[in-house]
Amino acid sequence: EVERAGAAVTVFAVGTWLDQHPEMAARILRGGHALGNHTYTHPTLHLLSPTAIQGEVSKCAAVLRRLTGSVGSGFRPSGGPSITSPMIAAATAAGYSVVVGYDLDSLDNTDPGSAAVTHNVLSAVRPGSIVSMHLGHAGTVRALPDILSGLKAQHLSAVTVPQLLAAG
């Protein structure tokens, strides 16, 4: 859906998902999207020790490196938008210069339906927003065409995090 609309996104992938679907790393990149690290097992990262955080980040970075030759375009912590100094330290040690959170939660992971996901995004999006959305939820997939056309109507477009940072 995203590619059909001429848009690009950043997929912050979980390492276990990449291990289960190794073909998706190349597919994401081939589609013109950015691929980054979202930890290996998707824990609530701020509850972990610095050593455990480092393990989550470095293990996912190793999967990305094995599948793509790179650690990816950045790191987004799992378990919420907050970014702590142990997360930054772990990301830096794993080779990331970009660590991002998000400012708009679509709540799609709660499976509220495509209309609610669309409303959650379009009612709160603003220029520069980083929107949290999740692969594997049917409502997310169904909401994408309406979200992308709604962004266009607001004179906004979906871009990758690297594109967003370059424009800033």
Image: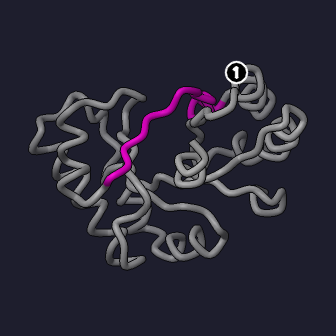
Residue 128: x and y in percent read: 62, 34
Q: Which residue is mark 1?
A: 124
- Label 1 secondary element: loop
User: Which quadrant of the structure image shows residue 8?
Assistant: bottom right
Please provide percent x and percent y for residue 92.
22, 51
Residue nearest the viewer, comparing 24 with 75: 75
Highlighted magenta segment, given as a residue range? 97-111
Residue found 36% across the figure and 68% down from its top: 64
Q: Residue at x 86, y 41 (%)?
A: 152
Amino acid bearing label 1: Ala
Residue 104 image point, x, y percent: 58, 27
Q: Say whether residue 140 is left or right of residue 72.
A: right
x then y, percent, for residue 78: 37, 39
Relative to 21, residue 142 above or below: above
Q: Is residue 106 left or right of residue 116?
A: left
State the residue at coordinates (59%, 40%): 133
Question: Residue at coordinates 43% horizontally, 59% vertically from top-left?
Answer: 73
